Image (cartoon, grey):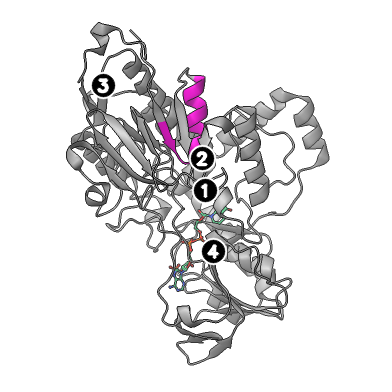
């Protein structure tokens, strides 16, 4: 017997595009992607602040199944990546499967199927749901007294307002992660004054972020598709270095950390400035920031870094703890994301009405990034513990989608009606992951968005080979199965 599972994929970013493509490649035809935004692209749709650049080389930050020969730059800008993702959607014929402006407000499992409801009232019913909702989606807006009294524009980096004029303005950028650093570097050039409120300094490694891809490289990659694939595979293998230095203390990690220190020493000559910009934790403990121009920007005559804590906001400025009033026309919040919310806010209810908000009250908890106990026939692509910053996310999403497709194959043949990971297997996976996390650089003593409310590091502590192996196998002893119908006998050919 054979039946065709009805699949809903939630999110049309890197994870959702990969999942849909792989499922279709594996022969599943009833696949619908629901996307809350007005366009596909995920983070590359939502983020469009000035200076937005991907800090992963373009020839690696792409799908293995759709390598692009003609990247304009070695590190692509946000708009270039969004255009690439949309080109891939068209080339793979996924466009007609994507419902835009389709915000899922609830997904409820009942009687062996999922009922997915949108904000506009539309309802979809599916056998399987894949959450491809991303990590860095919900903006974190700081609770600073008086922020709502400020008379100028207040913009979060992830919800940029294109109508806001930045030229000739006195601008505050709050936050010193990758986003704050990119924004300050970009806005400083034309601002009247830029004040970077940096509560905690970050290590900023120098990298040639604005270099163009050499014409010869583009010509060769365009002419010889095998070179394209070869270069991608080489970069993918080479990126194993990143997982190695992050997960294993060694001279290699120390050498990269020295490079971070050198980047600061070589670019900031004033001792007092350098001292103020020197973090008190190890390089790479937080997500490493790369920049080719940040230190130049903050040493310009119209720029200032303020590390004194913010006390309050007035209608026309910011007051810091030392009593100084910083007059401003505009405030940019580069204050990051609620990184552990994943698919929420969403009324997600699994078996016996169990709610995700309850089972994840202390932070996300999933098996091998992909399955959640209590939630049958539901998978996550780039879910909890995904290797943000150490292994290609496109590669990870593709392996996860293949893992999911394997379950769909078995559903299609009538082997089971529902599959659900067990609590025990999830606990075992997380206990092992948490102990593997101990020697990682992320656990060397800093506060970062990697940490869950329970204090666990929400990342992947292993290498790519381990990730591949874990997603290549179906451990039936880690799952429980149910059969609610007699489809196998009746030979339903849905
Ligand atoms: O956010 P963050 P981000 N008062 O969480 C500060 C990816 N990304 O948007 O450290 C004052 O790193 C906070 O201070 P502190 C990348 O993975 C990728 O910059 O908590 N400050 C911190 O400095 C990255 O890691 C690219 O003391 C407040 C900052 O806000 C991730 O996105 C580009 C505050 C938040 O830093 C997130 O980066 C951009 C307050 N009340 C981003 N609250 C690529 O190139 C928070 N802060 C691929």
| Numbered label attached to residue 417 | 3
Separation (CA) of disc 2 from disc 3: 27 Å
Residue identified by numbered label 1: 37
Report which residue position mark 2 lands on.
12
* 137 or 76: nearer the viewer: 137
Res 58 → quadrant: top right
Give the Cα separation between the discs numbered 1 and 2: 9 Å
- According to the image, label 4 marks what residue? 203
Some atom of ligand 1 lies within 8 Å of the CB belonging to the residue at label 4: no
Q: Secondary structure at mark 1?
A: loop
Q: Which type of secondary structure does the marked residue at label 3 adopt?
A: loop
Q: Label 4: how many residues lie within 10 Å, few (<14), some (14-19) or many (20+)? A: many
Taking the magenta stretch, the answer to whether it contains residue 264 is no
Q: Residue at x 71, y 77 (%)?
A: 300
Residue count near mark 2 (Cα–Cα under 10 Å), binned few <14, some 14–19, many ≥20? many
Badge 1, how many Cα within 10 Å: few under 14, some, many 20+? some
> Is residue 302 found left or right of 435 in the rendered image?
right
Residues tagged 1 and 3 counted as in contact (Cβ below 8 A):
no
Q: CA distance from mark 4 to mark 2?
A: 32 Å
Which of discs 3 and 4 lies nearer the camera? The answer is 3
Q: Quadrant of residue 225?
A: top right
Looking at the image, tell me whether mark 1 or mark 4 is earlier in sequence order: 1
**Front label number (1 vs 4):** 1
For marks 3 and 4 on the same chain, the one whose residue lies earlier in the sequence:
4
């Amino acid at each position: 017997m054979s039946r065709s599972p009805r699949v809903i994929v939630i999110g049309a970013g890197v994870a959702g595009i990969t999942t849909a493509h792989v499922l279709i490649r594996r022969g599943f035809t009833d696949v619908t992607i629901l996307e809350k935004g007005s366009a596909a692209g995920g983070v590359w749709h939502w983020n469009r602040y000035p200076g937005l650049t991907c800090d992963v080389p373009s020839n690696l930050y792409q799908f293995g199944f759709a390598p692009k020969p003609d990247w304009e730059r070695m590190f692509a800008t946000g708009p270039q990546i969004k255009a690439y993702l949309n080109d891939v959607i068209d080339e793979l014929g996924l466009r007609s499967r994507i419902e835009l402006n389709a915000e899922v407000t609830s997904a409820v499992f009942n009687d062996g199927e999922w009922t997915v409801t949108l904000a506009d009232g539309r309802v979809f019913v599916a056998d399987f749901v894949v959450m491809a909702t991303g990590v860095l989606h919900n903006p974190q807006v700081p609770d600073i007294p008086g922020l709502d009294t400020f008379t100028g524009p207040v913009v979060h980096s992830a919800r940029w307002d294109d109508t806001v004029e930045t030229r000739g303005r006195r601008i505050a950028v709050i936050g010193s992660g990758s986003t704050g650093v990119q924004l300050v570097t970009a806005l400083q050039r034309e601002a009247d004054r830029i004040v970077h409120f940096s509560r905690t300094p970050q290590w900023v490694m120098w990298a040639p972020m604005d270099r163009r891809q050499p014409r010869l490289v583009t010509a060769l990659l365009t002419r010889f598709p095998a070179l394209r694939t070869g270069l991608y595979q080489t970069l993918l293998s080479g990126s194993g270095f990143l997982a190695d230095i992050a997960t294993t203390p060694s001279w290699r990690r120390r050498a990269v950390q020295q490079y971070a220190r050198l980047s600061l020493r070589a670019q900031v000559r004033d001792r007092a400035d350098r001292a103020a910009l020197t973090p008190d934790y190890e390089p790479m403990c937080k997500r490493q920031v790369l920049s080719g121009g940040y230190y130049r920007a903050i040493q310009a005559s119209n720029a200032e870094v303020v590390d004194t804590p913010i006390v309050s906001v007035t209608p026309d400025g910011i007051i810091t703890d030392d009593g100084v009033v910083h007059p401003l026309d505009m405030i940019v919040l580069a204050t990051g994301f609620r990184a552990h919310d994943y698919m929420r806010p969403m009324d997600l209810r699994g078996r016996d009405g169990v709610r995700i908000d309850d089972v994840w009250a202390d932070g996300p908890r999933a098996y091998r990034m992909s399955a959640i106990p209590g939630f049958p026939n539901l998978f996550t692509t780039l879910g909890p513990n995904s290797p943000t910053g150490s292994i290609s996310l496109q590669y990870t999403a593709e392996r996860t989608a293949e893992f999911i497709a394997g379950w769909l194959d078995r559903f299609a043949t009538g082997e089971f009606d529902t599959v659900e990971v067990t609590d025990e297997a999830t606990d075992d996976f997380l206990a092992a992951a948490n102990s593997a996390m101990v020697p990682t650089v992320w656990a060397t003593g800093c506060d970062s968005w990697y940490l869950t409310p329970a204090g666990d590091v929400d990342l992947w502590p292993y290498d790519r080979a381990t990730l591949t192996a874990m997603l290549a196998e179906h451990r039936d002893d880690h799952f429980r199965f149910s059969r609610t119908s007699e489809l196998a006998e009746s030979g339903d050919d849905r």
